[in-house]
Image (tube, rainbow, N blue to C red):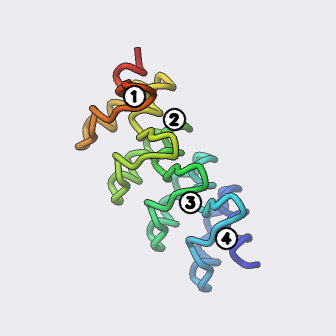
Amino acid sequence: GRELLLHYAARAGLEKTCRLLLERGVDVDAQNEDEETALHLAIKEGHKDIVQVLVEHGADIKLKIQSGETPLHIAVQEGVGEICRLVIERGADVDAKDERGYTALHVAAINGQVHIMEILLNWDVDIDTIVDGGNTALHLAS
């Protein structure tokens, strides 16, 4: 289907192809078998320009994949601060939880990503969310 072409183009970083497909009416939020959209795939590959194009065309910034991860969770996992900032500025829920109950701040803490934690802490992120038997993000960071 045409939606899969958008996934391939997003993953490959083909901005002109993404724009062309979206202008022709391809569903920006079409999901693959893992419930990933082109947005999730572009974030995984670190393609900020593609993320920008997809968001401009109405990509759902809060859509979760099977593991409950949002685009923000994925951006944090990849450690790309610019993309984290971009999706937050476009309305990502900074306190959304994945299937383990982890927020983006927990993921950044576990991965030791101080620069990402600083970005998240500049927004009104809940630092007291508890996971794993009583641990907050600050516990996980230590």
How many other residues sit within 10 Å of disc 2, few (<14), some (14-19) or many (≥20)?
A: many
Could you say whether the residue bearing mark 3 is in a helix, strand or loop?
helix
Going by the numbered disc 3, the residue's amino acid type is Leu
Q: In 3D space, how far apart are the residues under numbered discs 3 and 4 (Cα atoms)?
A: 14 Å
Instruction: Compare marks 4 and 1 and give the one earlier in the sequence.
Output: 4
Q: Which mark is residue 17?
A: 4
Quote the CA–CA distance across marks 3 and 1: 22 Å
Q: Which residue is mark 3?
A: 39
**Could you tell me the amino acid type at mark 2?**
Gly
Q: Spot the residue most to the front.
A: 133
Q: Amino acid at mark 4?
A: Thr
Give the residue number, with chain letter if any, for mark 1.
115
The answer to the question of whether label 1 and label 2 lie on touching residues, with beta carbons closer than 8 A, is yes
What type is the residue that disc 1 sits on?
His
- Which comes sooner in the sequence, label 3 or label 4? 4
Residue drawn where x is 37% and y is 19% of the image: 139
Q: Earlier in the sequence, mark 3 or mark 1?
A: 3
Tell us which disc is closer to us: 4 or 1.
1
Crowd tier of the residue under label 3, counting other residues whose Cα lies within 10 Å: few below 14, some 14–19, many 20 or above: many
Quarter in which the N terminus is drawn: bottom right
Seen as rendered, the residue at the extreme top is 142
Q: Quadrant of residue 78?
A: top right
